[in-house]
Structure formats: structure tokens, C-alpha cells
Image: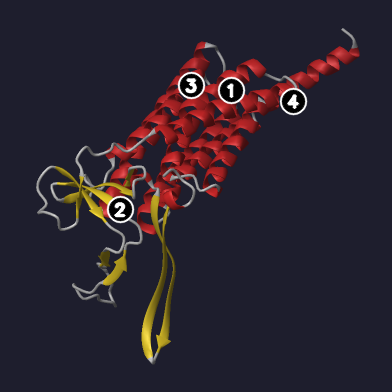
Amino acid sequence: MSPNDRLQDIRSMLAAGHRCVHLERSTLLLLGGVGGFLSVVTEWVITDTRFPDLGTRGVALLAWLAFWLGGVSLLEYRLTRRARERRAETLPFAQAQVTRAWWMLLSVGCLGSFAMFFYGGGSMIYTLWTVLLGLGVYFFGLFSRPLIEWIGLATILLGVAALAAGLPYGGTRWLAASAFALGLPLAGWLNSRVGDAGIHHRTLALGLWLVLVVTPALLMARGTHTPSPVTPALALGAQALGTGEQVLRLEAGTPIPLRLDLDSAFLRVPPHAELTMTLTTPMEVVLSDGNPDGRYRFGNGQWRDIHDGVLSLRIDRLRGRLEGGQPVMRVHARVDSRDFAGGDQ
């Protein structure tokens, strides 16, 4: 063997020592499957109907996430140890440390989701999980092959791009589910085939990963429709509201009083105090036994659900001032809907 060959072997050994982290197939399937499952199912389990109190709902979500993510982390740890023992391999120190960092990111996600119930920002919850997933993958990629690094960075950018583009709440939900359930196993599969190939192969693999992860999420977000009611719309005051499902139509110009229930140690609102708002466009609301069930639409547009995140209320400014010698509290709020911002009609 020539000196050049020996030198190349030494370089290969050093590179292998630095890139010593290897994720088991079971790890990718477990984390991806549970992450995708939680992204889809949590909305159906932790609801305001089951947990009317906000604090109780936050604690329920924290317990739900801790049960699944804690359980899968322990199971993944045991399966990884067993696989390494079966192959007579030791767990590299770098992988043990990165695994701890991964558990820390999962804990940050759980605590962040819990805190959003008390401090706001719930519309960003799935974006947060997508970014944390990208950070975890990137950390592993630092001690694995370069493609894993790239996929980690791409996942982070997907979360940031979804937030910057104003992707609806439902869209970020499906993007997070796809990044977990499809992105993690697909990253392992592509990594095993690309290996240490050149930059062109890694670029093609990354492009394929992006297409296969983003496309299903966008299709699911666009193809998920709120079920339309089958009963004809009734005008407000046309007849008494009965039981079962009914559709109430509110014409433009209909007054809608805003009443505030305020919990405060130093402020009080009279029970019957109200701010009269006026509807500027026709709106239909679905009633179940006389109460709104969350479905609505503007004009003859697409039916929406209040939990889709298409309709949003943001209070971005609260100021106290003196007007006419009297103290006044000025609040600036904005009610948005994608139906009036180029969305589907």
C-alpha cells in the first residue's frame, strides 16, 4: 500500500470518527409516527368542550404530550441499546449527548405548548414544533452525514417560511404532521442511499425530500373542507329557533353587540355593558340546538370552522390616555379572515 493510500485511509477513519452518529430505523419510525399522530389527533382530544377551563386544558395538553413523547423516548432508548448490543457496538459519546439535546427540545416543545394557553401565540404552536424538529435533526446531522444537516436546516426554514407566509393554522398543522411522519423516515432512507456522495447528489436528495414532505401537507390543507349543512338558511327573526341543526343568515348591517367578561383585581365591567358592532357582509352560522357549532361562511363562500384558524382576532395595542379630562382605555384590535385576503371564496 502506497503512502497516499495509507493517508487516505487515515483521513477516512478520522471522518468516520467525527461522523459517528447513526440513527436506527426504529428511532426514525417511532419519532416520526408519534409526532405525526400527535399533530393530527391532539386537536380532536384536547378540546374546549372536554376542558372548558383554559388552565385545565393547558394541563391536559401537557400531560397528553408528556405521556406520548416521554413513552416513545424511553422506548427508543431501549431499542437503540438493544440494536447496538446485538451488533456488538457501543453507543458513541456524541450520540448520547445529542440524544439528550433532542430530549431537551421535546421538553421545550411541551412547555411552550403549555405556556401558549396562558400567554397567547397558540396559532404558532405547530410552527414551533416544526422548528424544534428541524433543530433536533440538525444536531444529529452535525455528527452524521451532511445530508441530515441539510434536511434539518430545511425543516427549520419550512417552519419559518410557513409563519412568514401566513399559512393558516390548519396548514401548519398538516405541515408539522408531514415533517414528522414522512420527513424523518424519508431522511433516513435518503441518507442510506446518498451516503457521502457529492454535493449534486445531496442537492437532488434534498429537493426530493422537500417535494415529498411539502406536497402532501399542502394537499391535505387544501382538501380538508368543513362539512356543509343540509338545511336551508333562515333569516334572523324569521321564526323561533328549534332543536337540531339549523342555519342562521345574518344580513349586512346586522348589529352584533360585543360584551366583555373581564377578570381583574382593579377593573370592573358592568354585566350589561356592550359595544355595538355592525356586520358589513352577509354571514351564515350553523346552529346546533340553538347554539353555534363553530361552522360559518361569508356570503356564499366556502364553509369554515372556527377552529381552522382562518378567522382570527388580534389585540396588538392597549393604551391608557386622557380624553376630555377623563381616563380612557384605547384598545386596537384586528379581525382577519383569509376569505377577504385572496383566499378561497
Which of the labelled discs sits on residue 283, or is there none? 2
Residue 146 in the image: above or below residue 287: above
What type is the residue that disc 2 sits on?
Met
- Foreground: disc 1 or disc 4: 4
How far apart in space, not on screen, are marks 4 and 2 (Cα)?
A: 54 Å
Which of the labelled discs sits on residue 80, or is there none? 3
Name the residue at 76% across, 19% down. Answer: 12
What type is the residue that disc 4 sits on?
Ile
Query: In the rendered image, which quarter contains the C terminus?
Result: top left
Relative side of 37 to 230, left or right: right
Q: Earlier in the sequence, mark 2 or mark 3?
A: 3
Considering the numbered disc 1 on the image, is that residue within a helix, a strand or a loop?
Answer: loop
How far apart in space, not on screen, are marks 1 and 4 (Cα)?
A: 20 Å
Dividing the picture into quadrants, the one containing residue 308 is top left
Where is mark 1, residue-wise? 22
Considering the numbered disc 2 on the image, is that residue within a helix, a strand or a loop?
Answer: strand
The image shows residue 29 at horizontal and vertical percentages of 46, 22
Residue 16 in the image: above or below residue 43: above
Q: Earlier in the sequence, mark 3 or mark 1?
A: 1
Asked whether the residues under the numbered discs 4 and 2 touch, taking CB atoms below 8 Å apart as contact, a structural biologist would say no
Q: Earlier in the sequence, mark 3 or mark 4?
A: 3
What type is the residue that disc 3 sits on?
Thr
Q: Nearer the viewer, residue 228 or 316?
A: 228
Where is mark 4, residue-wise? 199
Mark 1 Cα-neighbour bin, 10 Å: few <14, some 14–19, many ≥20: some
Q: Nearer the viewer, residue 292 or 263?
A: 292
Mark 3 Cα-neighbour bin, 10 Å: few <14, some 14–19, many ≥20: some
Q: Earlier in the sequence, mark 1 or mark 4?
A: 1
Mark 4 Cα-neighbour bin, 10 Å: few <14, some 14–19, many ≥20: few
Q: Nearer the viewer, residue 7 or 205?
A: 205
